[in-house]
Image (cartoon, helix red, strand yellow):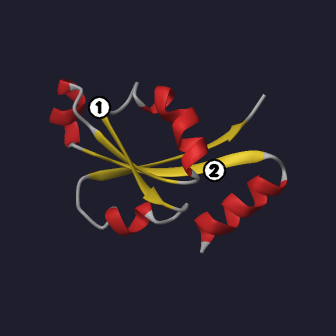
Amino acid sequence: DESRATAAALKESGAWFLDAGVAGGPRGAEAGTLTCMVGGEAEQIAAATPLMKALAAKIVHVGAPSLCCVVLSQPHTVSLSCACHRT
């Protein structure tokens, strides 16, 4: 699928790919209680957690990239994708 192909291409270039669903709606955003369900490698998620904590109170690792798409079948969710490069 597209997320896995993107992750593979970025990995070859030395970049990271994490995809995430953000749940909690406008009230969760206002209250600072959003949940971020992230697909990617555990080490990369750990490194990106401080950045994601700016958006969400709870970070949940759901597996490899594109696995959060299963979680995103729920209404009122937002998908967040990012590519990171280690410096």
Quadrant the C terminus occupies:
top right
Q: What percent of the width, then of the height, locates residue 11? A: 76, 54
Q: Position of residue 64 (x, y in %)?
A: 54, 62
| Tally of numbered tags | 2
The disc at residue 8 is none
Please name the residue shown 21% across and 43% down the image: 24
Q: Image point 24% across, 53% down: which residue?
A: 76
Lower sequence index among marks 1 and 2: 2
Please determine whether, in this image, residue 5 is positioned above or below residue 7: below
- Where residue 54 appears, as percent x and y from the top left, is 40, 24
Residue 53 x %, y %: 40, 28
Q: Amino acid at mark 1?
A: Ala
Q: Can you tell which mark lies on residue 57?
A: 1
Q: Amino acid at mark 2?
A: Phe
Which quadrant would residue 68 be assigned to in this image?
Answer: bottom left
Q: Residue at x 33, y 33 (%)?
A: 56
CA–CA distance between discs 1 and 2? Answer: 21 Å
